[in-house]
Image: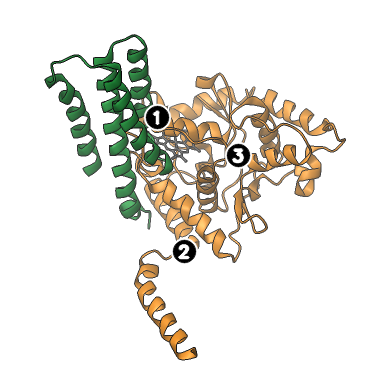
Amino acid sequence: MHTRVLVRLAVLLSLGGFATAASAASADDYKSASAKAEAVIKQAHALKNEWSTTVAAMKAAKKAADAGKFDEAVKHAQEAEALAHASIAQAQEQAKIWRDAEVR
Amino acid sequence: MLRKTLIAVAIVVGAATPLLAANDVNPQADAKAFKEYFTKRFPKVPLKDFVNGPYSMDEGLRKQWEAIDQFPPYDFAVDKGKQMFATPFKNGKTFADCFPNKGIGIRQNYPYFDTKSGQVISLEYAVNQCLKDNGEKPFDYTKDDMAAVTAYMAFTSRGKPFDIKIPNDPRALAAYQRGKEYFYTRRGQLNFSCASCHVQSPGHRIRTEVLAPAYGITAALPIYRSAWNGMGTTTRRFRTCNSQVRGMPLPGGDEDYRDVEYFLSYVSNGLPISGPGTRP
């Protein structure tokens, strides 16, 4: 429950975040956004809790960057970062509460 | 010296006791609770029918199945597996040399905990181990060769009750518990656990599919699925279930997959092997 709210918030933030900055993003902006996302994704991977939507967002970011559309690329990388954060939060929360669902 | 050690032990034990009490591992109680939960919830399903997955839950589906099973679509896989069993590796050995009873009628004992290597060995893992030990290339965990060999092994074990053992070894209990945790842990962007679908919603439809109950859920594997237009291994099924909730599937042979299969098969002890299965 908690996790779902987090996810929605995270995605909203990432979508809204960049739209307010009117200026066009550069290749460097993409690189730093993508590096930031990668670092979080690495943690999610270590917890064995990567989401396929995170992977898809990173792919979309790279595709946009390859086409020179850096605004879009940054937006997708930020989305991936937000999703990776949410998947980490999910794993951490579940590690504490999974037994609540147990058949007893 | 001794006194100091004793005090240290006392402190450690004192601190650990409440934790242990909250997390105690009791596979026997789990198996009992599982059986009770499913038999109470589905009082009309005969005990041995749980191993037929969605068919145990849905009368209409069962009729279709009985018609299809006149000419079982997994037959080709069983035949192929039989042939693979009869074909020697480059070193002259065969699959039969890797398994107890030459690999015949033993499916119900898998996964087992191997006290030598300290890990859970699923049937698929054992097949690949056999290939590697004999200098052969291991199979893709999701593809037809793996499905064929395991289909043949399941076929020769039909009707034999699951007999999964947890040896008196703390590592075995830990592996069981990890499998159980994997089963109940929500994952993927959709935030579902295996239990969300196979404990809370068996019999319900997801798109066109009827959800199988978790009790006996590993007994029919591998399965022929019309939707796949072919055979699916245990690994393929687990990976598909991960993807459905928008989670990244694990690689074949991953310890989590072996452990969750160990847990699921243990709590299904006594139910008969029904594989290979056919599914819509």
Give the chain coloured green: A
Q: Is residue B126 found left or right of B188 in the rendered image?
A: right
Q: Residues within 10 Å of mark 1 (few under 14, many from 20)?
A: some
Kindly identify which numbered label has been placed on residue B274. Answer: 3
| Amino acid at the residue labelled 2 | Asn
Observer-nearest of A38 and B219: A38
- Give me the residue at 50% from left, 53% from top: B267
User: For chain B, what colour was chosen?
Assistant: orange
Q: CA distance from mark 3 to mark 2?
A: 27 Å
Q: CA distance from mark 1 to mark 2?
A: 31 Å
- Give me the residue at 63% from left, 29% from top: B140
Q: Secondary structure at mark 1?
A: helix
Q: Please identify the residue farthest to the top as the structure is shown.
A: A67
Q: Is residue B59 found left or right of B134 in the rendered image?
A: left
Kindly identify which numbered label has been placed on residue B244. Answer: 1
| Amino acid at the residue labelled 1 | Gln
Observer-nearest of B206 and B184: B184
